[in-house]
Image (tube, grey):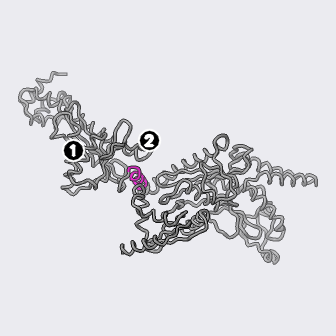
Amino acid sequence: MAENRTENIKGKLAVLPDLPGVYRFINKDGKVIYVGKAKNLKKRVSSYFVDSRHKENRKLVVLVKNIHDIEHTVVESERDALFLENNLIKTLKPRYNILLKDDKTYPWICIKNEPFPRVFMTRKFVRDGSRYFGPYSSVYIQKQILELIRNVHTIRTCSLNLDPEKIRNGKYSVCLEYHLGNCKGPCVGNQSEEDYGKNISLTADILKGNMKNVINYMTEEMNLAAANMNFELAQKIKNRIEEVRNYQSKTVIVNNALINLDVFALLMEDGNAYSSFMRIKNGAVINSYSIEMELGVEETEEDVLSFAISEFDRQLEGGIQKEILVPFIPNTELFPEKQFSVPKKGDRLKLLELAEKNCRLYRIEKIKYIEKTDPQRHTNRIMSQMQKDLYLDVPPYHIECFDNSNIQGTNPVAACVVFRNGKPSKKEYRHFNIKTVIGPNDFASMEEVIFRRYKRLLEEGGDLPQLIVVDGGKGQLSIAYNTIKRLGLDGRIAIIGLAKRLEEVFYPNDSVPLYLDKNSETLRILMHIRDEAHRFGITFHRQKRSINFIKSELELIPGLGPKTIEKLLKKFKTISKIKSATLEEISEVIGNAKAGAVKEYFPKE
């Protein structure tokens, strides 16, 4: 089977042309798993099967293993390839391309494509000719806008099918909304479609943020009513104008000179990407929302931003606007007639920074939500990120860390702490008394402890960790690594050293350290396990020193041997408790004669 796959791929590579086009990788089930574009199909596709490309990208390794067939389409230019690739990704949704991850359906406001259109909120986007406005990041904001529309315009709220023939046949009768003055009764022929259409047009202006058009039209209506001596209607329209102005004043005003533009921000982290969008109309932010995307095998920032913008363009009423602010220029060929700019100062830069802030907050919100609702997915995300950051073969669900403790060579001990799923597993912590090392020798102590720990796990068939962290730099790491090799565990367990001073990560046989992002979760977990090993080791060392001090003092009492001292320590634990104990209490443990010697040695307090 593997030979057939290899021969098939070799045959497909041999016939690929040196022309621009789009290629599709297909798995054993005949499903397209990746779509890509190329200036030269032969060179581009052949490059996937060169081993050197796979070293830094584990997702690419998995992709290549799953390729069983290759298809391609030749086009006239690289620009045509870009458009075709984009369309195929949207249609086929291949596993290893960028994919939208949002399981959250945003709310929209819909103007239904029907006679006397209804205006209502929905989470279903149906392409039936209806107009959709949004999406809105908040249901509260959406309800506010709907309330404004219904207060300002007489729009029907019923769900009747107002077919003209049914209206002519008198199928319907007016409802309470008509009597309250909230509807003009189109269901009984009291309002024409043309008059109703004016309200719908003004409603669309409100939803687009064109408040100026709405206010101008309503002002004309108010003046006309006043000229006709209909002062009650004029006052009613005036109240509605004030309501529109009050709503407009609540929007985020940036700068009245900024007329119509869109703003996009992008954040790529943890194998995912987050993009935020803001729409500016007449100097105010009238819409804003964010999306999450799962990255494919080798997308650039430009590819991801282009994908995000095309997704917003597909969803937004009328598409994206002509002027667009971005952190960097995307693939502009996908968006002809659009003007992209990267702001450097002023209000445009502030807008971009606001969009980027929304991006970061959205990522934090998603992480917190996943942590609460799906802890395993949250753990898998962190482990996958650690695997990527530390260049490991597998995610480090089980990590062990070692630390030595001694003061001028006295009471040498070591500690082993265990983390599972990025969190301490305290029941698995272990202390070690150093048995074979005399004097202060951290290297020899590390060698003894590592050997004892993993020799025992091998003999007992215990659970080996995916990663060992050594508290120290190149010297400690080298000793630990050689010990692992001696046990035959090289390749089965990854091992790194974490130096305290600059939080440098060292690898065996590599003198150049790795520096992790100071704010990364990977470094936070490594520092936590290192600090926990230090704390656990120091605590044990202090206990041991305290016990040895007590023993040395008790040894000065005439007639007390090692076994008697052990009995006293087992019962009373500390010198102070022995001093405060009565003769009878001590006698119960070691007999009357020795108890008398103890009480005679310690003066009464």
Q: Magenta residues?
A: 379-390
Mark 2 or mark 1: name the one nearer the start of the chain. Answer: 1
Side of 95 relative to 456 (left or right): right
Side of 144 relative to 473 (left or right): right
Disc 1 on helix, strand or loop? helix
Q: Is residue 151 visible?
A: yes
Q: Amino acid at mark 1?
A: Val
Quadrant containing the C terminus is: top left
* Residue sitting at the far right: 228
Q: Residues within 10 Å of mark 1 (few under 14, many from 20)?
A: many
* Residue 296 picture location, percent across and down: 49, 60
* Residue 198 picture location, percent across and down: 81, 62
Check the image and report above or below for 1 versus 317.
below
* Residue 286 picture location, percent across and down: 69, 51
Disc 2 on helix, strand or loop? loop
Q: Is residue 528 visible?
A: no
Compare residues 206 and 190 and report the one nearer the observer.
Answer: 206
Compare residues 230 and 436 and report the one nearer the observer.
Answer: 436
Q: Which mark is residue 518?
A: 2
Is residue 456 covered in magenta? no
Q: Which mark is residue 449?
A: 1
Q: In the rendered image, which quarter is residue 221 located in?
A: bottom right
Quadrant containing the N terminus is: bottom left
Is residue 380 covered in magenta? yes
Q: Amino acid at mark 2?
A: Lys
> Majority secondary structure of the magenta segment?
helix
Q: Which mark is residue 229?
A: none
* Residue 287 picture location, percent across and down: 66, 52
